[in-house]
């Protein structure tokens, strides 16, 4: 799974990132909306944690444990999202649901990567000073809380 995410992120990173606008609303804004479902937050955090880990890996960041933990957290949140959808859509094939969760996560990751690389081009920072930094803090909390709730 880690290799699949890394390959996908590498391909996405090669796309044009000239447009400097924010592609997604922040997770904090999503959480303020009472109709936001937990599965949506899991998908966003899956995409973000995988994206940031991929960027760190591509940049040869020295803390390999941090990178591995980010990929692991993304996989765990993805499995929670898949489980929720399997419960809601129990008549659908499990592999179909898994494929859709991966597809949606990669689409969201593409938007995050677009914003991170665009920010890097303008400020020299991928995450710092952006909504992505705030989302990271929230997603780490979501991951830690989900471990408590699902354990």
Image (cartoon, rainbow, N blue to C red):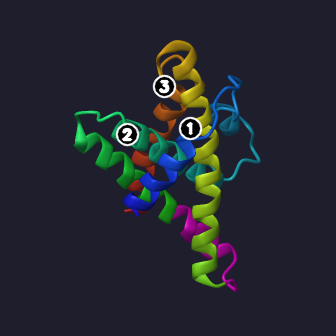
Q: Position of residue 72 (x, y in %)?
A: 36, 54
What is the C-alpha distance between the residues marked 3 and 2? 12 Å
Pointer 3: what residue?
126
User: Based on the displayed image, in which of its 4 quarters is residue 97 positioned?
Assistant: bottom right
What is the C-alpha distance between the residues marked 2 and 1? 12 Å
For label 3, the SS is loop
Q: Position of residue 36 (x, y in %)?
A: 72, 47
Residue 84 magenta-highlighted: yes
Q: Position of residue 141 (x, y in %)?
A: 45, 39
Tell me the quadrant of the picture where the N terminus can be found.
Answer: bottom left
Structural crowding at the residue carrying mark 3, measured as other residues with C-alpha within 10 Å and reported as few (<14), some (14–19) or many (≥20): many
On the question of residue 47 being in view, the answer is yes
Q: Are marks 2 and 1 in contact (CB under 8 Å)?
A: no
**How many dots with numbers?**
3
Structural crowding at the residue carrying mark 2, measured as other residues with C-alpha within 10 Å and reported as few (<14), some (14–19) or many (≥20): few
What is the C-alpha distance between the residues marked 1 and 3? 9 Å
First-in-chain label (1 vs 3): 1
Pointer 2: what residue?
58
Tell me the quadrant of the picture where the C terminus can be found.
Answer: bottom left
- In this rendering, the answer to whether 58 lies above or below 88 is above
């Amino acid at each position: 799974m880690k290799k699949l995410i890394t390959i996908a992120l590498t391909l996405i990173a090669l796309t044009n990132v000239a447009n400097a606008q924010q592609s997604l609303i922040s997770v904090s804004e999503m959480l303020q909306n009472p109709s936001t479902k937990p599965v949506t937050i899991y998908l966003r955090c899956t995409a973000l944690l995988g994206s940031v880990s991929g960027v760190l890996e591509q940049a040869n960041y020295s803390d390999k444990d941090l990178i591995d933990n980010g990929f692991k957290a993304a996989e765990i949140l993805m499995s929670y999202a898949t489980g929720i959808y399997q419960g809601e859509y129990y008549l659908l094939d499990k592999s179909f649901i898994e494929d859709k969760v991966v597809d949606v996560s990669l689409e969201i990751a593409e938007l995050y990567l677009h914003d991170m690389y665009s920010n890097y081009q303008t400020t020299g920072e991928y995450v710092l000073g952006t909504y992505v930094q705030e989302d990271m803090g929230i997603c780490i909390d979501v991951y830690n809380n989900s471990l408590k709730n699902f354990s």
